[in-house]
Amino acid sequence: MAELAIRDYLRETSIIQSRLITALVVVVIGTLALVARLAYLQVVNHSHYATLSLNNRIHLIPLPPVRGTVYDRNGVVLAQNFPVYNLEVTPDQVEVMAQTVDELAQLIRVGDDDLAAFERKLEQRPGFEPQVLRYNLADDEAARFSINQYRFPGVRLQARLQRYYPYRALTSHVVGYVGRISEADLGRIDRTSYRGTDYIGKLGLEAHYERTLLGKVGFEQVETNAHGRVVRQLSRTPPVAGKNLHLSLDIRLQHAATEALGEYRGAVVAIEPATGGILAFVSNPSYDPNLFVNGIDAAAYGELRNSTDRPLLNRALNGRYAPGSTIKPIMGLVQLGEDENLGEVFCPGWYKLPNRSRPYRDWKRGGHGKVGLTEAIEQSCDVYFYRLARALGIERMHAKLTEFGLGNATGVDLDGEPDGLIPSPAWKSAARGEPWYPGETIIAGIGQGYMLVTPLQLAAVTATVANRGHRITPRLLASLQSPRALIEPLAADDQGQLEANTPADYQRIIENMVGVVHGKRGTARAIGKTARYTIAGKTGTAQVIGLAPGQKYDAESIPEKFRDHALFIAFAPAEDPKIAVAVIAENGGGGSRTAAPIARQVLDYYLLGRHFDMDDAMADEPPPGNTGLRVPTRPVIPGWL
Amino acid sequence: MNETSEFNVDVPLLGALLLLCAGSLAILYSAGGEDLGLLGRQSVRIGAALAVMLVLAQIAPASLARWSPYVFGAGLVLLLLVLGIGIVGKGAQRWLDLGILRFQPAEIMKLAVPMMVAWILTRTPLPPRIRDLAVAMAVVLVPVALVVLQPDLGTAVLIGVSGVLVIFLAGLRWRYILSVVLLVAATTPVLWSMLHDYQRRRIVTLFDPWADPLGAGYHTIQSIIAVGSGGTYGKGWLNGSQSQLEFIPERSTDFIYAVFAEEFGLIGGLTLVALYMFIIARSLMISFYARDTYSRLLSGSLALTFFFYLFVNIGMVAGILPVVGVPLPLVSYGGTSMVTLMAGFGILMSIQSHRPLMQ
């Protein structure tokens, strides 16, 4: 057996080895065939294929879509596209580059910056790829080059569309801006969709509605001659333009609110209660978004970034402030909804927890005397709400205030909206690892301590009160318009009716808020006297620094940066609200003195229609770094509705 | 050689494979539009494939022989599973998604089929008898049919070839080979009717790509122009106009050799072919001197299948074979075939290091 096995083994070995040798012969023959074919293509026929390659001019040219236009509620253009001419050079088709550039410089202005950027790209990119020598040619430059184009093979004018924001700083915190597509953007986008497109939404609505605004890229298959000029079109898939955004924003109100805010750092957010449409969305100070479209230079960016006023911060969306006394009407609703009957409370000007010595002071040193809920809201009595907070307890306050949407992002159509903060023992233990102290409940009753809201959230809750408990998500976009199609209005994002309070509760709190403005002892009575319509409002003052017990707050003696923030919320007309507004003026001192008059101006403008000259708001010069751009025709502002 | 060493690895083979992978990354950088992310992903795949190779190199061929039926059985079940999912999903289905892992069961068959055929043929003395041949053919044709149904013609051809090569090496009589060739010639019209439209168009345009330069012939024409215009010395790395202007379709996968030939010319292209020939020669040598019949059949099939890959891909790029979707082995972008190929080299290394000390 063993011998047989060995013989088999030897026989099998010789079978396989002979087959392997046969296979090796086939491998060698096959390889030689490949080598022969490659040598035939690359050596014998090289010049033929080199010519074909040079003449290989069947190009797939991307046809970038036109980005959607952004309009305000009256059809005023807030973001649009402008045709600009760029001068492009294909290095491989240019005989002597230095000479060509010199000759071009006699026809058009070529700056040192342009030249440096161009030369950098020449080194980095392959020679067959066209590079931009000059962006945004002036009309006369484009004309001069066109006449002389025959002298410059490999050089061509390329028409491009560039984004432009006519209202500049007025819209930067709402519309945002587009910028050149960066390396980071490339990683997260579908590159095919952006073929031929240079810009992408970076911030604001431009970023949030990027996919809606972008449109769909088209392609054109063309045959070109040796100079890259198209000689024949073979096929064409047209691009689909992006959709136009029609906003609920009123640019004139936006302007009025910005003017009203004046030099204060702060925010104004105005909402149409019935639809949730945002009418004004102001964050002050602001900046010119056009600077970012073609890339902002380092010095200008550094200035914006390092400014202590922080113009890049979108305060309306991202600024988080203690609501202060503006929380009191909501606390009143919580009280009514919970049937927590405090009766009349005596306010001596301070409040102490049982068996504790620390006094929690009222803003009015002498106290308000005997107050009910009505007087407590009208006169903004702190002691009443200290006692209410004590009676409700922090857990119930947290649960009920959260029902109104406080503490959470509103879900507005802008990216990066933060949550607010309605504190609770669970939150404090998780975030800080500390227990909840009874005194923290007391100050939460007047919107101080850990409690934080954004101006947008404050405006949204004001709109909810104006709607008598009907919550609607605030939104900037009112309708969409496809190219060559009708405007499609969007349904409001209705969150439904809050169940905790009866219509009578809202009626009472709204009457109290009217008392704040129109009552004899109301804290905002100064703006109520001359008003031609009924305003429901509430003042607020948010502490920036804590005061030691016994220390007196003196606005004059402390640095401006540490002065209190001034707040005011309002809606009007109170009986049929058309507009709800929240105002925050940073370091403005008191809500009644600073924030209420700002809100009054906004309401006046919207309800009574005082006209501003919008020409002041629009840029007079063409976009920066651009000598030839046609200045947009000024939008005709329709007369008041 | 390495009988006493604890870690089995064939240094010449490993060196050549690493050189090939390095070349692959260099050309992928150019073909992929200088995308470092793509390069990173390919590096991860190379790393994973090398790890699989080194693990398999430690497994004795005798164990592989014992496992052959089980590996084949498992592969068959997965193929049926993927086909079933495809029928339910009403579309081409090649992938099996295991949550964290996605792979093509067809890839397993590239190794399982030659293993199984070698296992069947070595149970009785060579040359194989008719009955064994029938079983072996069934083992080849069933998975091939299942993969054709996916439909993935390229992979089906590679699986079929790897199995048929084992039968050939086992000493299939020449008269059988001749009669099969005649049979294939006779059944070609039937096969033709089974092909998908896009596959037929590819074969027709093979003979005359210029008949439809913007349609089915486009791939081949642009590829030939790229290769031919590269000339002797090439246009230089990152400078191939055919490649960089995206005239070459699928330039980082199936047509990557066209990018290589355009940018590095005939000299570069032949250097790459020489590197492949070294790997194939080394593999054939391992097969020639292997210890037992199973090892010899399996390693011979793996070495020759690798050549088949190379020949079909470069033949396709150079316009002498149809466009069937076979990647350039170990160079094209993509993960699954990379792992399978490296696993094959792992088996070769194992066979090399388990050789007897004396003849």
Image (cartoon, rainbow, N blue to C red):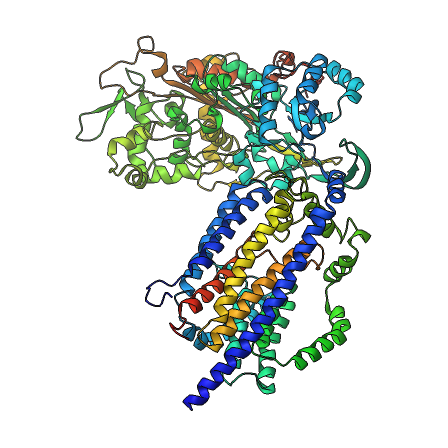
Asked where in the image residue A68 lies, by quadrant, the reply is: top right
**Image coordinates for residue A266, horizontal then vertical, percent:** 46, 19
Q: Nearer the viewer, residue A375 or B83?
A: B83
Extreme bottom residue here? A1
Asked where in the image residue A353 lies, by quadrant, the reply is: top left
Q: Quadrant of the C terminus of chain A?
A: top right
Q: Is residue A249 left or right of residue A108?
A: left
Q: Nearer the viewer, residue A452 or B141?
A: B141
Labels in figure, total: 0
Q: Nearer the viewer, residue A325 or A151?
A: A151
Q: Residue at position x 33%, y 27% from top?
A: A448
* Residue B222 showing in the rendered view: no
Q: Quadrant of the N terminus of chain A?
A: bottom left
**Image coordinates for residue A491, horizontal then vertical, percent:** 62, 39
**Image coordinates for residue A416, horizontal then vertical, percent:** 48, 34
Where is A407 relative to A319, above or below? below
Q: Nearer the viewer, residue A42 or B326?
A: A42
* Residue A405 showing in the rendered view: yes
Where is A508 relative to B347, above or below? above
Q: Is residue A393 left or right of residue A33?
A: left
Where is A63 relative to A31, above or below? above
**Image coordinates for residue A48, horizontal then vertical, percent:** 76, 44
Extreme top residue here? A556
Where is B187 relative to B324, above or below? below
